[in-house]
Image (cartoon, rainbow, N blue to C red):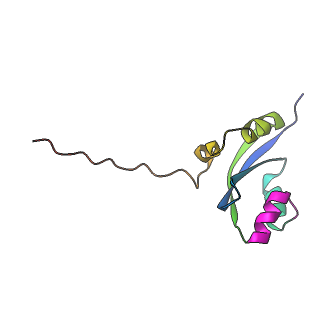
Amino acid sequence: MDTIGNVYLIHLDKPLAHARHYVGFAYFPLRRFSHHLNGSGSRMLAACIERGITFRLARVWRKRTRRFERRMKKRAFGSLQQYCKFCVATPQRTLRRRTK
């Protein structure tokens, strides 16, 4: 049986190499996020801190499994943007040409 916890998505304000997001699993995501902020979390986010790249907690999926986390991590490059509240662009109005 897979462990139930929370999966969270972190948005990087500037890309680190090709990465714009980080996905993680935690029982207490806000506590885990504070570990990331002070550099004692993941190595990737510690590298962001070393380079002065800021990041924000974008989303938390409650009552999810590590299998869900793996599935999110395996998504194609850029597809996490659809789940990130900081990446979702506001819809652009399309201009219509006047017809005579």
The answer to which image quadrant residue 48 occupies is bottom right
Left or right: 67 as drawn, with respect to 90 = right
Please check the rendered image and state whether residue 3 is part of the magenta-colored stretch, yes or no. no
Left or right: 13 as drawn, with respect to 99 = right
Q: Position of residue 57 (x, y in %)?
A: 70, 57
Front position in the image: 37 or 12: 12
Q: Residue at x 88, y 63 (%)?
A: 40
**Residue situated furthest top in the rendering:** 1
Q: Position of residue 15 (x, y in %)?
A: 67, 59
Q: Image height check: is 95 above or below 69? A: below
* Residues shaded magenta: 40-51
Asked whether the viewer can see residue 91, the reply is: yes
Quarter holding the C terminus is top left
Q: Image height check: is 40 above or below 8? A: below
Q: Position of residue 25 (x, y in %)?
A: 82, 46
Front position in the image: 85 or 71: 71
**Residue situated furthest left in the rendering:** 100
Classified by dominant secondary structure, the portion drawn in magenta counts as helix
Q: Residue at x 69, y 38 (%)?
A: 75
Asked whether the viewer can see residue 34, the reply is: no
Left or right: 76 as drawn, with respect to 88 = right
